[in-house]
Image: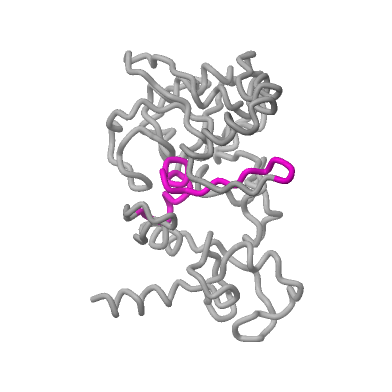
Amino acid sequence: MAAESTDINREFECPICCDIACNAVESSCCHQLFCEDCIYDLPDKETCPKCRRQMTPMISAYFARRVIGNMQLPCPWSCGEQISRSNIKDHESLCPNKIYRCTAHGCTFNGNKVTFGTHLIEKHLNIVVKNSAILLDNNSRSSNKEPTKSDVLSKRRNCDGREAKLGENGKWYCSGRLPDKCRCCDGQCGPNGCNCPSCMRLDVEIRNLARGWLVNRLGASCTDRISSDRFQGTWYCGRRVMAGTRNCDGYCGPNDGPQCDSCFILQKQSNTRYRGINSME
């Protein structure tokens, strides 16, 4: 079984970096999978690096991305947990074994989160105090502003009375069960990804979003409106997250063209789980 799994994994390898394709895209000429960034960074964009024929537009390999995202691998920092590839970023922020490197001038300290925190207090207390205003700024944020360090520590009560915390992607989560089946995550509200309707209402309230706006699973504000009175039917966040996608300038929308995976998921959820939340109706 292990040998079979290894053989299957090879089918999802990018021939440029020889690793499992990250944000997989597929060539139209030979149907080979590549990492989105590997293709984007190629100096020769005229020749396919696999079949050597003329490069044809790349298309997002959504099915391959879902399969790759569900692949299990041991924690890169050796904490002993098995994690899915799609959750590596989430696990990185929580893993007790992750090594942090001190960037203070002339300092060579490396250590896990606990020892790194102790090191900062013992060796660089003046720097920590001097920058505390940046780290602990509690001033209110304007609409759509990126969350500060203090936001990550914030807690609120959602409309269901559950305590919600701000995730690293800027969305609110209460750890409750989602009201419907979710194919893109584990069915729980947080700590990242999809959230419940009550926490989505909190997202909208805290960001003071205009009618017709919601927040996708990566924390980007998005809408299906061109203007307050013009409805386009497709949700876009306007971020540059689609480099290498066919018939696309690399941006998700904002008014037409392909949409990113997160907005595609939110578009479906806007008619089910989030129906009626901050809508124009």
- Residue 187: % across, % down: 30, 39
Colouring style = one colour
Nearest to the observer: residue 58 or residue 164: 164
- Residue 130: % across, % down: 71, 22
- Residue 195: % across, % down: 40, 32
Q: Is residue 181 visible?
A: yes
Instruction: Name the residue furthest bottom.
Output: 52
* Residue under the point 52% across and 31% down: 215
Q: Which residues are magenta?
A: 83-106
Displayed quadrant of residue 138:
top right
- Residue 207: % across, % down: 57, 20
- With 187 as the anchor, is 221 left or right in this view? right
Displayed quadrant of residue 246:
bottom right
> Is residue 93 one of those drawn in magenta?
yes
Q: Quadrant of the N terminus?
A: bottom left
Nearest to the observer: residue 258 or residue 46: 46
How many numbered marks have been drawn onto this rendered protein structure?
Answer: 0
- With 15 as the anchor, is 97 left or right in this view? left
> Is residue 182 one of those drawn in magenta?
no
* Residue under the point 59% across and 33% down: 120
Q: Is residue 17 above or below residue 23?
A: below
Q: Is residue 229 visible?
A: no
* Residue under the point 33% across and 47% down: 183
Q: Is residue 168 above or below residue 49?
A: above
* Residue under the point 31% across and 36% down: 188
Instruction: Name the residue furthest front.
Output: 122
- With 46 as the anchor, is 77 left or right in this view? left
